Image (tube, helix red, strand yellow):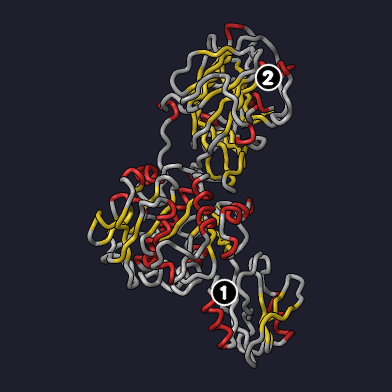
Amino acid sequence: MRLVFVLCLACQGAADSPASDADVGEACAKEDVDALHLLAMRKNQISDIGDDGTLGNDRTMGDDPRMVHDPRMGTGDAQLDQVLAAGTGTIIEDASEPCNDADGDCVTVCYNSGFDFGFGGRFMPNNGEKLTNPANFGPSGTYKTKMKLVAIALSDVGKDALVNNKCDIFQLGLSIADAVANPPSDLRADQYAGLKEWSSEDCSRVLLASQMTASLWDAQYAVSQGAWNPMKLTELGNRVLKGPFGVTHGFNQGGYWMGYFNKLPPADKYCTLITTASGASQPVALIDKASNDIFFSDCGILSSLGGVSLSSAIYTNNDVLYANLYTFMINLVKQGTCNACEYAEEIESADDVPETTPTTTTEPPTTTTTTTTPDCSEILTLNPLVAVQSNLGGLGPDSGPEEIRYEAAATVKRQSVDLVVTASSDYQAQSTAQNGVFGKFGQINVKYGTSVDLKFQYVLSGTDTPVKVNKFALTVYDIDHQSAEKAEIIKVCGVVGASTFPTTSVEEIEAGPGCKSFKSTKTSGAENNPNDPEVALTDEQKENSASFYFDQPTSEFIVTMAVDGKVRPSGRNFMFAGVPAIPCL
């Protein structure tokens, strides 16, 4: 864990006693050193307490310092000077490590440390605490996504640092000088360019910035002084900035400068969320369509100058705006949408998730030939499938939700994702005991002479919350039959293309726009079935398989499984896995 500011620790239970070596050692032993990088204050010095308990002198202080406990995160240099001059100590959490798999539903928010208008700075001292307060964000909070903050040292700010720290959102702090500077100068030109490149190359990354930073993204943006309170939400802004934390009413910008965008690119390059009291001619918050980044003309709205409270709670109008704004950005990260403005038009509030357009009505993709060959390194590969619920169509063998749920089928943006299969039409089976898995494959049994439309959906593990996935594949194996009049048919919709082996035994048949469909032509038994989707297939197994590809973010798609012939008690098993088996394996 990086240490940004040299500060001193005082632990609870020793708040009124001088900081002796024994106090320091005992107090620090009680702290969670995995969550905090701790510093302890001793008489006449600040001492770095390492995880091994060793002390290292860092800086001289006045006589008789006393230990205090103050769990605020990220103060700036000005507050550090005040702490030192007063001879008191503060615990500083240098943010935390980025989100990891153990965190579950979590988003990493990065920031440049040590700025007046930035986390822990003079005008945003508690903004970070609002995001990390578990009563606000987290499994037991108002919004269920956890946030972890990571400070990026000024000299390190840039694309590489943000990628290495797994940043999902970056809030760009600025100094008092840059609050009125044109162009901005807190960072070097290459650092600003790195931030732009970082956000623009991945739709699941969002940058939040203010003042003249937007002009470095597009020279047609410019900001001028002279906005009027109260601020007004546009129709789009009302969708984005109301949400789980409430509805904002009459919030202000604050400060003496009061900026608005007085120069803008063509209207199709951005969408407006907030205007001044003067209306649409004076935008103060917008989304840049090219980058999906969010720009405020004046950071005062997001600071104590505009009314953001000096606590970790959410209760003022500006608090509500700030918390709902982060809720919206979290969903942009999770959904990976590449057009935040269109996304905003489809939602009713910040925590809303647009309904996915049914894949059966998807327009024809640009590439639909069966010779489509994806870049295998870019295709998400699902984990071996493990069924924890099997009650497709309500036919059992389990009770409960009428679904087959494959637990932890993938990790998407460091979130565990389940694959859930439900029947969208009448479902009949020979034996539902066959449903669920066969080895490491998913498997579904279909009765002869019947067909079923199945919705495959990615959801946040343990929930029904949709999660969009970009660039993935589905391979269906063992497409064969016992006799020609009992052929197996598989159709997948919403695909960009499909691949079969050069000497394939399956026949492509008419499927309709945006869909690909194949029919078995070969008679064979179970002796040639594959055992593991991660093991190279034999040529015969490849001949009986087909891989389907998706290259746009989606949370669900439709798969039709059918068996020709008359309805009879027996049936066929369809085996599948989330791997690009042909031609990647």
**Residue shown at 64%/89% (left/top)?**
17
Q: Which residue is mark 2?
A: 542
Image-based side of 440 in relation to 288, left or right:
right
Residue appearing at x 57%, y 25% in the figure: 548
- x and y, in percent, of residue 448 in the image: 56, 14
The reply, left or right, for residue 192 in relation to residue 251 is right
Amino acid type at image mark 2: Lys
Residue found 55% across the figure and 14% down from its top? 508
User: Of residues 280 and 237, which is closer to you in this image?
Assistant: 280
Q: Quadrant of the C terminus?
A: top right
Choose top left, top right, bottom left or bottom right for residue 57. Answer: bottom right
Q: Characterize the local packing of mark 1: few (<14), some (14-19) or many (20 or more) Cα atoms within 10 angstroms.
A: some
**Residue picked out by circle 1:** 71
Amino acid marked by disc 1:
Pro
Residue 160's disc is none
Residue 229 sits in which quadrant? bottom left
